[in-house]
Image (cartoon, grey):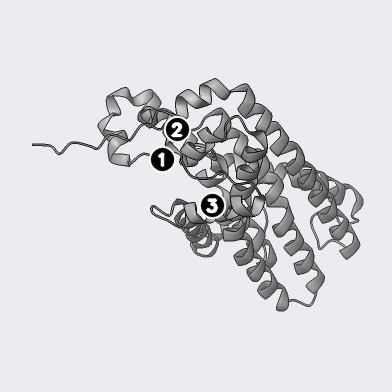
Amino acid sequence: MVPSTPEPMAADVRAYDGPLPGTLREALRAEWRRVLRPPFETPLTVAINAGLMSSAWFFLPPKLVDDLFTLHGSVAFAFVLSSWMYSDVPATNVLAPDGLRVLAAIDEPRVLGRLLLAKSTVLWCFVAPICLLISFIAGAGQSDKITAVYSAVAIGVVPFGVLAVSGWLGILYPYHPVPLRYRWSRRRDWKPMLLRWGTLVLLPYAVVPGLTIAFLSPSLLIWGLTSPSGLTKKLPDNDFGLGIALACAIAAAAVWLGHRYALRLIARRRDALVAYLSDPKRG
């Protein structure tokens, strides 16, 4: 006799009876409580990605490392690690894991804005301190410490812009975090349950690094055109600093525009989101 797979409980707008956050501080507290209870999706995901990226950087053959990573060096390791640690579902699937609270706030844009900003901030808190520490440790062993400082600024600022935009994916295509055994039990309905889910699980590994590169592209272009040696040798400190400042300015604009457009997207897709988030059986 095959044991039955438990059915996910259907969500209901009225099922959330807790207070909605009236301030960003309250939203942050609520988000910390959510991510620090089982199944600990965010901390486990960040830790696994950090382990995978570090293993690839240090243990793969040099030729394969060159193909996988375009940046090299001890300080670059911290930046690449940062990008990879963000590259997973916590950065994109921002609505469905917190479906009840999102449904309760679906018609309150200010509350939704706080929720989205709190999710980005908490994820940043899991990643940035570790990568900043690595950056400063790596920079301490080099003669040019200003490079480590500039890199730390980029590690601290650029991801906020990336996260503000990457969350659009989870607004357009959310999916419920249901157990794998439930998905497998519904494998005959493979298109929505397995194909769609599998695609959305893998997309963050392209979306997040792609956005990071997009935010850095103007700086890379300027460095390549203005530096006497292009990108083949160490950049002058002033050129490097100006490029990082430009990337941070682009990220800051992306935070403002990204969250504004996210709220507009939620309002536009309000009925579809309510229907989907109210039914975890849709996977």
Nearest-to-viewer mark from 2 and 3: 2
Q: Where residue 6 sits in the image (x, y, percent)?
A: 25, 37
User: How many marks are shown on the rendered structure?
Assistant: 3
Q: Is residue 234 above or below residue 11?
A: below
Q: Where, by quadrant of the figure, is residue 91 drawn?
A: top right
Quadrant placement of the C terminus: top left
- Is the residue marked by circle 3 packed among few (<14), some (14-19), or many (20+) residues within 10 Å? some
Q: Where residue 47 sits in the image (x, y, percent)?
A: 48, 59
Q: Amino acid at mark 1?
A: Pro
- Residue at 68 percent across and 28 percent down: it is 264
Element type at marker 2? helix
Q: Is residue 47 above or below residue 281?
A: below
> Who comes first in sequence, dot 2 or dot 1?
2
> Who comes first in sequence, dot 2 or dot 3?
2
Q: Is residue 18 above or below residue 135?
A: above
Q: Between marks 2 and 3, how big is the CA–CA gap? A: 18 Å
Nearest-to-viewer mark from 3 and 1: 3
Residues 207 and 125: in front is 125
Q: Where residue 57 sits in the image (x, y, percent)?
A: 55, 61
Residue 30's label in the rendered image is: 3
As drawn, the residue found furthest toward the left would be 1
- Residue identifier under label 1: 177
Residues 231 and 25: in front is 25
Could you tell me if the residues under marks 2 and 1 are in contact, i.e. CB atoms within 8 Å? no
Q: Is residue 210 above or below residue 233?
A: above
Residues 142 and 177: in front is 177
- Residue identifier under label 2: 14
Q: Between marks 2 and 1, how big is the CA–CA gap? A: 20 Å
